[in-house]
Image (cartoon, grey):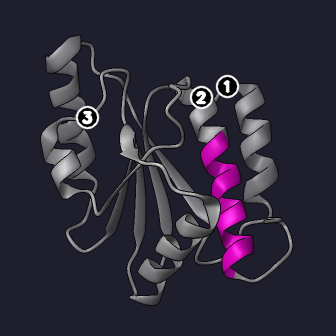
């Protein structure tokens, strides 16, 4: 079992890399993360969304548990996220988390997703989303393991 993040965009900026590294050093299987960056489309609008979505789906195996980050998704608390991820791992699933590009993803990616998750009703820059995601995955790991990182 593994956890992979597919993110449309450029490589992590230095401050993001430092923050992500802080949490990744603490992650253990199956919550340890690998990143795959997908270049932005040179197109704009719907054409970019379509092209990037196609690139995303080409990298998603049929049997993975797919989590799509989307501002229109479900807003869950950290224990609920931990439970969803642990449930996927318990079922023997690999987990893939998708961070779409500036224009989002098309309906094919949304339809393929097992869980559409919103970090917040606010919209964040992609670099910041990556850092928040790394922290939330660490938090989910600690909650799933019954450790005291998360205080209710």
Disc 3 is placed on an element classified as loop
Q: Image quarter for residue 50?
A: top left
Residue, disc 2:
127
Disc on the earlier residue, 1 or 2: 1
Q: Answer with left or right where residue 73 lies relative to residue 15.
A: left
Disc 1 is placed on an element classified as loop
Residue span colored magenta: 132-144
Question: Residue at coordinates 43% horizontally, 54% vertically from top-left?
Answer: 97
Q: In which quarter of the image is the C terminus?
A: bottom right
Q: Residue 64 carries which label?
A: none
Q: Nearer the viewer, residue 110 or 63?
A: 110
Query: Distance from label 1 to label 2 (Cα)?
Result: 7 Å
Q: Is residue 79 above or below residue 89?
A: above
Q: Image quarter for residue 41?
A: top left
Kindly indicate whether the residue at mark 2 contacts the one at mark 1 (C-beta within 8 angstroms): yes
Disc on the earlier residue, 3 or 1: 1
Residue, disc 3:
105
Label 3 neighbourhood size at 10 Å, few (<14), some (14-19), many (20+)? many
Residue, disc 1:
13
Q: Answer with left or right where residue 58 lies relative to residue 6.
A: left
Q: Position of residue 45 (x, y in %)?
A: 21, 13
Query: Distance from label 3 to label 2 (Cα)?
Result: 17 Å
């Amino acid at each position: 079992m593994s956890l992979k993040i597919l993110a449309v965009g450029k490589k992590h900026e230095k401050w993001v890399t430092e923050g992500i590294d802080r949490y990744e050093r603490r992650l253990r299987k199956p919550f340890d993360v690998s990143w795959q960056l997908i270049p932005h489309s040179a197109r704009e609008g719907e054409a970019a969304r379509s092209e990037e979505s196609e690139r995303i789906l080409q990298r998603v195996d049929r049997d993975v548990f797919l989590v799509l980050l989307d501002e229109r998704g479900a807003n869950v608390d950290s224990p609920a996220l931990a439970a969803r991820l642990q449930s996927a791992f318990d079922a023997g699933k690999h987990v893939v988390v998708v961070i779409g590009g500036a224009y989002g993803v098309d309906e094919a990616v949304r339809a393929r997703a097992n869980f559409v998750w919103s970090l917040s009703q606010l919209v964040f820059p992609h670099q910041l989303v990556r850092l928040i995601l790394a922290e939330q995955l660490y938090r989910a790991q600690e909650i799933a393991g019954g450790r005291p990182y998360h205080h209710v």
